[in-house]
Image: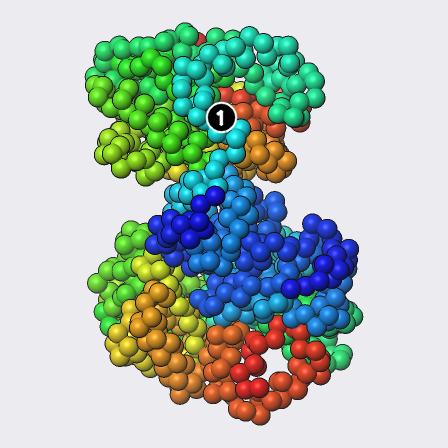
Amino acid sequence: MLSQALIREFKTRVGEDAVFTDPADLLTYSYDAAPLQQVQPALVVRPAASESLRQAVRLCNQNGLALTVRGAGTNLSGGTVPLPGGVVIVTNALNRILEINSEDMYAVVEPGVVTAKFAAAAQAQGLFYPPDPGSQAVSTLGGNVAENAGGLRGLKYGVTRDYVMGLQFFDVDGELIKTGARTVKCATGYNLAGLLVGSEGTLGVFSQITLKLIPLPAAQRAMMAVFDHADRASETVSAIIAGHIVPATLEFMDNFTIRAVEDYSHAGLPVDAAALLLIEVDGHPAQVQEDADRVEALCRQHGAVSIRVARDSAERTKVWEARRSALSALAKLKPTLVLEDATVPRSKIPAMVKAVSEISREYRLSIGTFGHAGDGNLHPTILTDKRDKAEWERVEQAIAAIFDRALALGGTLSGEHGTGIAKACFLEKETSPATILYSQRIKKALDPNNILNPGKIIAAAS
Amino acid sequence: MADIGELRRLMRQLEDQLVVCMRCGMCQAVCPVFAQTGREADVARGKLVLLDGLMQAMLDDPRSVRERLQRCLLCGSCAANCPSGVNVLDIFLKARAILAGYLGLPPVKKAIFRRLLAHPRMLDRVVEFGAVFQKLFTRPVNEIVGTSCARFASPLLADRHFRTLAAVPFHRRHPSLDTPAGWSGLKVGFFVGCLVDKIFPNVAEAALRALEHHGVGVFLPEGQGCCGIPAVSSGDTRTFNDLVRYHLDKFDAADFDVLVTSCATCTSTIKKIWPSLCEEDLRARAQTLAARTMDIAQFLVQRAGSETATSRSANGRIITFHDSCHLKKSLGVFSEPRDLIRANAGYTLREMAAADDCCGMGGSFNLEHYGLSGRIGRLKRDHIAATGCEVVATGCPACMLQIADMLSQAGDRIAVKHPVEIYAESFSAR
C-alpha cells in the first residue's frame, strides 16, 4: 500500500486525472497478452506530457517503487506485467507525431504513438515505415522499440532496431539522455540507442524516438505456392534465400493452420495442401518481374503442386488476408493460445519445421505452425486450455523442447517477442552465465535501486 | 445485500465465455470510448478482466465493476474485430443482469422500467401528456435539423439539442393494420419501436408507403411497446422478459412472412438479444421469430425487389449515410440502405470518412455519460459536415437523435433522415 501523501504527490506532479488507485483500475493493468500470472500494481499513472513522465520516473526512484512502462499491453513475453506493489506508467497519452520530415526521410514521435497510425501518416507523405508487428493496429512505437518488434517484412526490411536513428529517454533520476541523431550517419558517443532497443524498460524510459523512413516501393507482386509435403515448402524457402533473392515477405503455413484459416474465412485455401508459401516481392517494376519469375521457377523446381500469382491488388489483398487471419483462426479453436517465436538460421527452417511436428506428437498437443519462414522466425502456436492442469504441464515441457531444438540448430529463443518473464529462465542456455552477469552489472550501474522493470530479461540467474 | 459468494457463483455461468478472451488487446483499435479516454477499463479486454477478477475473487467491490461495465456503448465494434471471437455483448448484458440482481437497480431506473416501459399503454399515455406540455419547456433551435433545446436550465436535458415528441405519435395515426399480401405475395409484421412511434412517426409512415408501393401486406398489432433494450442493458431482465413475452404473444402466432422494423436497434435486439437472454420457456418462440426478422431496407432490397439505382444521379442533393452499429456490426447490413438511397434520383450519395464509426449514442450511455458521448458524437459530426451534404441518413432512430443533437449544436443546416424516407420520397413525388 502506498501512503496517501505519496499518492497525493503523484497527483500533484503527474496530474489529478492521470493517477489511478481504485483496485478495479489496478486490475486492468495486471496483465499483457502473454498467458502468465496476473500481478496487480499499487498505482497506475498516465502522463500526458514529457515533463509529467519525467516526474513520475523520479518519484518512483526516490521511493524505491518498481516501475513498468506500458504502451498497449500487447506484449507476448510478459514484459509489461508489473511487480507487486509497483507502478505502471501508461504511455498512450504521449501520442504525438512531432515531425515527419519528407526531405530528410525521418520522423520524431512520442512513445505512445500507435504503430499503424504512424505508418499511415508516413505513407500519406509517400514514405514507408516497414516494421509491421502483428499487433500494429494497437501497439505503440515505444513498445516496439523496447521489444525490438519485428513483423512480416523482417527478411528484406529488417526489424524495429533498423529504423531507430535516435532516442531521448529518462534515466532513473529523471535526467534526459540523448543518443543518436537526425542524420543518416552519427559517430558520436556510445551507441546508447543500440543498448536501449530491446531493453524492455529495464534501462530507461523513452520520451522521444527518431525513426528512419524509406521511399515506398513502386511495385509489388504476391503469390501463393501450394505443396503436398511440408519439407518441400521449407526446402523452397532455403532455396530462395540461397538463390540470393530477398522477397519482402516469405511466409509459411502448415496444414493445421491452413485448415483453421479456411474453416474461419472460407478464402478458398487448398485444405489438403501439406503447406503453403505466401510470397511477395517488391521494388522497381522490372526487378519485381524478374524476382517473381525466379521465385516461381524455384517453387516449381522444389515440387510446388501449383502456384497462384495475384493478378491485381484485390487478389493480393486476399493472399495477405489469409495470412493475417492465421492467428485469429487458430485462436478460435481453444481458449488459451501460446504463440512462440523461436528463430533459426534460414537454412535450418526444414529441420525446425520437422522438430515442431515431432514435439507436437511427443507431447500430444495441437500445434499450428506458421510464420516468417523467410527470416527463420516460425510461430509454432500451441492450442490449449490453461485450466487443464495436466495438459498445461505438457505445454511447458513442449515450450522448453522447442527452445532446445532451436538453440541446437544455432538459433535464438525469440525472434521478435522479447525475453520478458516468459523466457528469462532460458536466457542463460542461449548465452552464458558471464553474459547474464555482464548484463546485470550494466543494469546495476544504471539503476542502482533496481526500479526499472525488475525481473525481466536477466532476472533468473541472480 | 446477498452474499458475495453467491455473486461469484452466478458469475461462473460466464466462465466459458470469458476464457475465450486471450488478452491480445486488438479491441483497443476500434473502441470509441477507449479512443477518447485511453483507459484499459474502458475497453473490452479490461472489462472482461474485471468480470474475471470478480469471479475469481481478485476483486471484492461489485459496484466498481458495474460502474466500469456501464461505460460501454454496446456498439459491438470490439466483437466485430475480435480475433478469438469473444461474444462481448452477450457477456456484458448477462453480467449487467447478474450485477443488477445482486446490487439492485438504481431507484429511478427501476421506476421507469417497471412502471412505464413494462406497460406500453401507460408509457403511451405519459408520453402523450409530455407532448402536449413540452412546448412550455422547450424552444426550437434549428428548423433544418428539427431540434429544440430547454427553455430553462434542466439537469435532464442539459445542453442537448433534441427532437421533440411528435404531436401525434404513429400509434394514434395507425392504431392497428391487417392488410392482405398485395401483388408481391408477401406480408410483413411491422414492429414500430418507441423512438419511431413517439419521435419519428414519419419514418414508419414512409415504411408503410414503401411496403404498399411493393404490394406487401402489413400486420400491425395494437398496443405495441418497447423491444426491451433499455431494460436489459441496465440488467433489468424482469422487465425485458415481460416485454419479450408481451410482443411474442402479439406477433408469433400471426400469419406473415417476415417481421420488419425500421429501427436498427429493435431489429438487432429482436434477432440477437431476445433469443439469447430471454427466459428458457420463451426461447424457442423467440428463436423462431428472430429467424424471420429483418431490417426494413434489407427486406425491401432482398425480398420485395426494390428497384436499385436506375440512374446514379451525379447532380442531386448531396446525401451521406451513417452505418448504425446495430445495423452493420450486429446484423451485417450496410449495402441495402445505400441501395434505397441510390434509388432516389434526386440525391447523390457521397460517403463520409469512417461511415461505420459509432456516433456515441449508445442509448442510456448518452444519458449517463453525456460528455463522453458528445466527444464521440462530434467526431461523427465532423465527418458528416466534411462531405458538404444537405442530408444525412441512417437506419437507426437512436443514431438520428444523437446526430441531430451534434449537427444542431454545431449550427449545421443538415437534415437527418432514415433511408426509407429518402426511398419513399422517390415514388411519392412521381
Label 1: chain? Answer: B
User: Of residues B340 and B154, which is closer to you in this image?
Assistant: B154
- For the question of whether residue B246 can be seen, the reply is yes
User: Of residues A52 and B7, which is closer to you in this image?
Assistant: B7
**Mark 1 sits on what residue?**
B111
Q: Residue at x 35, y 79 (%)?
A: A397
Is the residue B122 above or below the residue A40 in the image?
above
How many other residues sit within 10 Å of disc 1, few (<14), some (14-19) or many (≥20)?
A: few
Count of marks, rendered view: 1
Q: Residue at x 66, y 18 (%)?
A: B150
On the image, which quarter does residue B145 sit in? top right
Q: Residue at x 61, y 28 (%)?
A: B406
Q: Quadrant of the C terminus of chain A?
A: bottom right
Is the residue A346 above or below the residue A119 in the image?
below
Q: Quadrant of the N terminus of chain A?
A: bottom right
Q: How is the image coloured?
A: rainbow
User: Of residues B81 and A190, which is closer to you in this image?
Assistant: B81
| Left or right of residue A207, residue B66 in this image | left
Residue A46 at x, y percent in the picture: 66, 56
Residue A193 at x, y percent in the picture: 67, 74
Is the residue B115 above or below the residue A309 in the image?
above
- For the question of whether residue B26 can be seen, the reply is no
Q: Which type of secondary structure does the marked residue at label 1 adopt?
A: helix
Disc 1 residue type? Ala
User: Of residues B210 and A155, which is closer to you in this image?
Assistant: B210
